Amino acid sequence: MPRRHDPERRQRIIDAAIRVVGEKGLAGLTHRSVAAEADVPLGSTTYHFATLDELMIAALRQANEGFAKAVAAHGGLTDTRLDLPAELAGMLGEWLAGERTGVELEYELYLAALRRPALRPVAAEWAEDLAALLAGHVDPLTARALVALMDGICLQVLLTDTPYDEEYAREALTRLIPTASGPTASGPTASPGSSAAPTPDSPPGRRPRPGAGRR
């Protein structure tokens, strides 16, 4: 009997794998359970995905698209004039306000990389992609710090089952971004005891006393 042409089968298997993880957790993910969920022969799952790691990589990459869509909905963060902390906090709020099962599933697959090294490069993709977008607004180190903070906030919300506080997230993100008056923009500040120029409150012609400011 000729094999039926089914170009969508691979995608159906990935969708089925995501549903299985959502219903049974990672422990319930097997080629057999996915084949049953997708209503395809067992051989189809092993044909498209020789190992469970390959299947999980495909599922994780698709799950990552949930956050990517939230970024795209905000114009891809391409406008350099935007209020970055407010934009990021709002983006997190929209993503976390989505279907809770879907958000938890994304993180379950994401955290599976702790015990499955093959998943780690894919798990890191969303952070790397977001940091690259933020590089148009802040320096690379700050971009990585912002991504780490957003990741931590998401984990706290999911693990503690507490409501997302957008104002807290905005304020926390703001504190990581150097301001125009900070050391990053204006250069290093003078250390105590250095021969700095007299301040407006200093008497004219008087230099700082040697050792002033030392403890």
Image (cartoon, grey):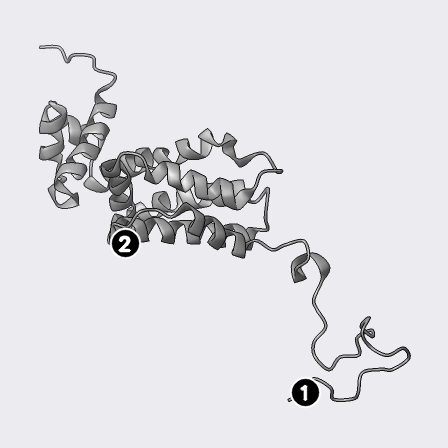
The mark lying in front, picked from 2 and 1, is 1
Q: Quadrant of the N terminus?
A: top left
Residues at marks 2 and 1, CA–CA distance in whole angstroms: 48 Å
- The front one of 105 and 204 is 204
Label total for image:
2
Give coordinates of residue 87: x percent, y percent: 50, 40
Pinpoint residue 124: horizontal percent, then vertical percent: 39, 47
- Circles 2 and 1 in contact, beta carbons < 8 Å: no
Dot 1: within a 10 Å radius of its alpha carbon, few (fewer than 14), some, or many (20 or more) residues? few
Horizontal relation, residue 175 to residue 109: left or right:
right
Q: Which residue is mark 2?
A: 114
- Residue 188: percent from the left, percent from the top? 70, 66
Q: Amino acid at mark 2?
A: Leu
Residue pictured at 59% horizontal, 34% vertical: 79
User: Foreground residue, 68 or 164?
Assistant: 164
User: Considering only vertical position in the picture, is 8 above or below 161?
Assistant: above
Residue at 53%, 56% (x, y): give it: 175
Judge by depth and name the residue closer to the eye, 168 or 25: 168
Kind of residue indicated by mark 1? Arg
Q: Where does label 1 land, which residue?
A: 214
Estimate the x, y position of residue 136 in percent, counting from the top left: 59, 42
